[in-house]
Each structure stands twice: as structure tokens, then as C-alpha cells.
Amino acid sequence: MHLPSSLRVLFLSLATLAVLANASPTTDTNGYRLARGLPPLPPREFGRNKPGFEPTPVLRSRASPSPSSIVRYSGRLQVRSNNGSTIGYVQDKLGLPVSGGSDLRISITASSTRKEQLSIVATTTSLPSPFYIGASTQDSGNATIGAGSSNFLYFSNVQRTDVMSRPIEIGNGNASVESAIWAINPMTKELTAQYVNPDGSLPTTFVVHDGASSRLYFVGDTSVAFNASATSAKLFVVD
Ligand SMILES: *[C@@H]1O[C@H](CO)[C@@H](O)[C@H](O)[C@H]1NC(C)=O
Ligand SMILES: *[C@@H]1O[C@H](CO)[C@@H](O)[C@H](O)[C@H]1NC(C)=O
Ligand SMILES: *[C@@H]1O[C@H](CO)[C@@H](O)[C@H](O)[C@H]1NC(C)=O
Ligand SMILES: *[C@@H]1O[C@H](CO)[C@@H](O)[C@H](O)[C@H]1NC(C)=O
């Protein structure tokens, strides 16, 4: 199509108006991005008091064929053992331990059509960037987990990765990370993880709690992947 430039300008301004009209001032920008199948915006590296919130909508998105409603979950991450007893809450502290600090506050944006491969973002935190909560190998660990393997990943604050992304190497390659691994049960608000291995395979992904270090880890096999102090754990979003 070859429009005269004046027409093209008119068309572009109309398109811009349409996009702006769509974005009410109270609209959650990340929610709108998710509704359109786009990943959430990365948290701001500056003005750290409210990471994860973008004050100014900058919409470059295509029109969404089927609008879906946005569901926002926010609160704390409660860790329970398999028998339902509460172990603790994920703490706003390096290593994201389950005790010994103040509770981390998080937010998750899902939609009526998308409840999986979600990212958890820390909303008010004293942690240094990055602000997503996911899996990291740290210390050049093996990024492949699975049945029969003793490999494990750290529950950690990580950079944002795309939906269904394989682990991304960060820094000088010392660690591989993944953020979009979470699914939420809208009724119970239980979070479950689905990690993507470097070869693209989807291992059953368990969260375990290690009482000795008071930390959480991801494993592909609870019977061989960790030492005796680790037990299966469940994660819930609570107020
Ligand atoms: C539940 O499980 C945890 C960890 O496995 C254990 O410490 C606790 O005693 C159990 N509580 C009950 C009521 O069985
Ligand atoms: C990582 O672990 C997988 C599964 O146990 C294994 O097949 C692979 O050889 C390991 N890679 C390295 C570099 O050790
Ligand atoms: C990363 O790995 C390099 C060697 O490849 C090492 O010198 C450096 O200390 C490591 N950094 C961290 C933060 O582990
Ligand atoms: C394993 O267990 C020991 C002793 O309980 C503990 O010191 C250690 O931190 C645990 N975790 C790992 C990854 O070895």
C-alpha cells in the first residue's frame, strides 16, 4: 500500500489516538501488555521504591484480537510443607530465605486466557536488581534438572526472561536464569513451577525447602536431588 504522506500522517495519528483512548490512566501497563501476549515491562532500574510499576504507558502494541480480563495477584509468598503446615514466608533479603527478615511483597499479572508461564515481580524490596523471582543456577551450576538427576537450581531474584524461554546466561556466563516459570491456581492461589531445560525439555519441577540453609530450590527429582534436610514445599500467594 502506498499512501500519500499526508494521508499516512493522518492514519498514524488516528491509530495513536485509538491506542491512547484504550489506555485509561488507571490501566496497569503490564496487564495490558500481558493481555496482548507481550511480556511484562522490566522493572525500572532507578526510582527503586516501586520496582515493577511503570508510571507512563508507552504502548507500541498491536491491537489485540480478543481482549481478556486482567487478574492481578499481590501479597506475600507463603511457603508450606506437604502436610499443609506453614514453614514461613519468602523474605526480602539476599538469597530469598524463608525466615530471618521481613516478608517480600510480590505481584503477579495473569489474564483470563493466560494463567501459566507467569513471572513474579518483587514490588517493594530492598534487594538489588533484578526484581523477578525465578530459577538461577548461580555459581555455574548445571542448568538441566530432571528425573534421576541430582542437579538443582536456586530460588532467586533473576532477570526477566520470555515465556517458554530456555535459561538465559547472565553476567559473564556464571549463571543461567529463568523467570517466566510460574502458574497460579486462581482458586487456591497456589503457585507451581514449570522450568524449561537448556535443551527445551520440560522437567517436572519441584520446589524444595532446605531447613539447614532456610532456602528454597528447584529440583527435577525430590528423591535424589538434594540432601536429607530438604523437603517438598508448596508456595501460595497470601495477603
Ligand atoms: C509437617 O511437615 C513438616 C516438614 O516436613 C514437619 O516439620 C511438621 O512436623 C509436620 N507437621 C505435622 C502436623 O505433621
Ligand atoms: C548436566 O546435567 C545433565 C543431566 O544430569 C547431564 O546430562 C549433563 O552432562 C550435565 N552437563 C554438564 C556440563 O555437566
Ligand atoms: C565468574 O566466573 C569467573 C571465571 O569464569 C570468576 O573469575 C568470577 O569470580 C565469577 N564471578 C562470580 C560472581 O561468581
Ligand atoms: C545440605 O545439608 C547440609 C547439612 O544439613 C547443609 O549444610 C547444606 O546447606 C545443605 N544444602 C546443600 C546444597 O548442600
Image: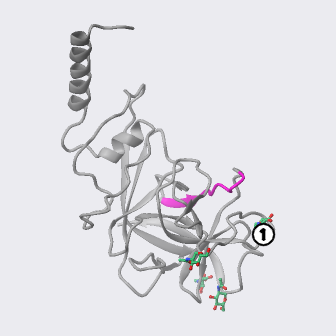
How is this picture coloured? one colour
Image coords of residue 198 (percent x, y): 68, 56
The residue at the far right in this view is 148
Q: Is mark 1 within 8 Å of ligand 2?
A: yes
**Quarter of the C terminus within the rendering:** bottom left
- Comparing 116 with 16, the one in front is 16
Magenta residues span: 190-199
Q: Is residue 77 visible?
A: yes
Image coords of residue 190 (percent x, y): 51, 61
Q: Residue at x 48, y 58 (%)?
A: 188
Image coords of residue 115 (percent x, y): 50, 47
Main SS of the magenta part reads: loop
Where disc 1 sits, the SS reads loop
The answer to whether 229 is drawn above or below residue 62 in the figure is below
**Quarter of the N terminus within the rendering:** top left
Per the image, the residue denoted by label 1 is 149
The answer to whether 120 is drawn above or below residue 128 in the figure is above
Q: In the figure, residue 46 lies in which quadrant?
A: bottom left
61 within the magenta span:
no
195 within the magenta span:
yes
Q: Residue at x 22, y 46 (%)?
A: 56
* Rendering quadrant holding ligand 4: bottom right
Query: Pointer 1: residues within 10 angstroms few (<14), some, or many (20+)?
Result: some
- Comparing 220 with 70, the one in front is 220
Q: Is residue 82 visible?
A: no
- Comparing 84 with 35, the one in front is 35
Q: Is residue 176 left or right of residue 5?
A: right
* Residue type beneath disc 1: Ser
* Badge count: 1
